[in-house]
């Protein structure tokens, strides 16, 4: 464990940068906006005495951040890129990629992973890792027997690199999902019901040209999306909480339930043995990922209905980075009263937000600003515990 202070960076474009595989990468405008608007989000998980990189933070944003930190009983320092030459710290970004490593490597006081470590993170972030994880789940569930039957994998993705093979698979497996290899959180996912659609074929040709293959998954009748959040360190996986969420029609994150861990556990326990699922997932992650990765990760799962029973698909995707699930798990325990629940959501406005006080029935997780295009909040009335006072 390093004794250096942490430097937190919210690089929300991490998945896109990983997909590009380039050291010189420029994120699209939408990604740049969310990076700017959410730059101070790490105040909620930052350690006492740490730094947060927020290059464009205004005076009122810094005041807001300092107020939040004080309420949480800690002190953080906001820095910009110009101050980094004077900072000595261990960097903890949202996620690691080659472009971020290159940008930070010129600052001698920053402790960074090696290029080989970041290359391994990219390799492990390829969606084919889900096949490896599901096979490890199947082997471990087989050894446990009936107790693990609810989350024994029954559907494995297949990886194809030939255009015609993918098109044929889509034609014969109606409603299947086609996913590009490096694209998490709902990005790079298509569900083409007609394999001859020009839009789908154009997208597929691009994915095969730039990323080499596509993953095809069976459609499942989803009942509930959820995730288990972990941190891996020295080959050991530490469970950090549950995330229970919903996606929109485009398979992107919509909102999540924020509540104390016991309440979220009870929701998952309605579908399977929640404690055994955590135990098995811990062992699988240590076996497959543990020797090759240190840091936060989230593994998305799905409770689905099939053949008159509810089962668990134990790896929809793996996110080798910090996730919003880590944040909501922490906030549910720290801020929400027992027996209550809040809703976490991310809102977007193309013209910016003029209603700074619209979250009076909840807690703003990012600075109220009319210039912001994105904002994050916990919505709910009379659900927050005395651990947080506005």
Image (cartoon, rainbow, N blue to C red):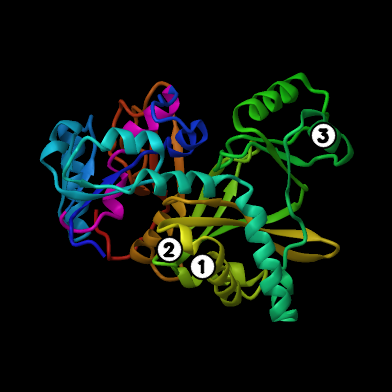
Q: Residue at x 26, y 54 (%)?
A: 46
Considering the image in quadrants, where does the N terminus appear?
bottom left
Q: Where is residue 324 in the image (x, y as percent from the top left)?
A: 44, 50
- The residue pinned by badge 2 equals 232
x and y percentages locating residue 352 in the rendered image: 37, 25
Q: Which element carries disc 3, helix, strand or loop?
A: helix
Residue beneath the point at 45% across and 31% down:
348
On the rendered structure, is 102 left or right of 16?
left
Q: Residues within 10 Å of mark 1 (few under 14, many from 20)?
A: many
Q: Residue at x 61, y 32 (%)?
A: 211
Residue 33 lies in magenta, yes or no?
yes
Q: According to the image, label 3 marks what residue?
A: 165
Q: On the image, numbered disc 1 is attached to which residue? A: 286
Q: Earlier in the sequence, mark 3 or mark 1?
A: 3
Quick check: 95 left or right of 135? Answer: left
Q: Quadrant of residue 190?
A: top right
In the rendered image, the vertical position of residue 99 relative to residue 77, given as above or below? above
Q: Residues within 10 Å of mark 3 (few under 14, many from 20)?
A: few
In the rendered image, the residue lying farthest to the left is 86
Q: Which portion, as a residue range, is magenta?
A: 29-49
Give me the residue at 57% from left, 44% from top: 126
Which picture quadrant has residue 28?
top left
- The local secondary structure at tag 2 comes to strand
């Amino acid at each position: 464990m390093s004794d250096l202070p942490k430097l937190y960076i919210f690089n929300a474009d991490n998945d896109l940068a990983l997909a590009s595989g380039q050291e010189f990468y420029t994120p699209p405008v939408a990604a740049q906006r969310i990076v700017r608007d959410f730059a101070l989000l790490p105040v909620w998980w930052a350690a006492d005495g740490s730094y947060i990189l927020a290059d464009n933070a205004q005076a009122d944003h810094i005041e807001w951040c300092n107020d939040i930190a004080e309420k949480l009983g800690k002190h953080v320092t906001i820095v910009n890129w110009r101050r980094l030459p004077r900072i000595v710290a261990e960097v903890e970004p949202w996620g690691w990629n080659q472009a971020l490593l290159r940008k930070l490597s010129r600052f001698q006081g920053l402790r960074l992973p090696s290029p080989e470590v970041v290359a391994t993170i990219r390799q492990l972030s390829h969606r084919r890792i889900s096949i490896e994880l599901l096979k490890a789940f199947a082997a471990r569930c087989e050894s446990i027997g009936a107790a693990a039957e609810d989350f024994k994998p029954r559907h494995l993705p297949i990886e194809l690199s030939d255009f015609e093979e993918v098109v044929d698979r889509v034609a014969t497996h109606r409603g299947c999902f086609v996913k590009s290899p490096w694209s998490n959180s709902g990005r790079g996912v298509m569900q083409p019901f007609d394999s001859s659609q020009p839009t789908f074929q154009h997208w597929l040709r691009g994915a095969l040209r730039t990323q080499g293959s596509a993953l095809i998954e069976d459609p499942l009748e989803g009942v509930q999306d959820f995730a288990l959040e972990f941190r891996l360190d020295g080959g050991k996986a530490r469970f950090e909480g549950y995330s229970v969420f919903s996606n929109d029609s485009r398979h992107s994150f919509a909102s999540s339930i924020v509540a104390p861990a016991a309440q979220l556990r009870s929701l998952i326990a309605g579908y399977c043995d929640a404690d055994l699922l955590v135990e098995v997932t811990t062992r699988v992650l240590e076996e497959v990922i543990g020797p090759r990765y240190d840091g936060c990760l989230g593994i998305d799962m799905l409770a689905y209905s099939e053949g008159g029973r509810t089962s668990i698909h134990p790896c929809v995707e793996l996110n080798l980075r910090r996730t919003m699930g880590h944040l909501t798990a922490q906030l549910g325990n720290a801020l929400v009263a027992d027996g209550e629940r809040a809703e976490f959501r991310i809102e977007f406005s193309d013209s910016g937000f003029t209603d700074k006080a619209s979250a009076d029935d909840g807690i703003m997780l990012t600075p109220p600003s009319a210039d912001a295009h994105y904002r994050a909040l916990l919505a709910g009335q009379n659900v927050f515990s005395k651990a947080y006072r506005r």
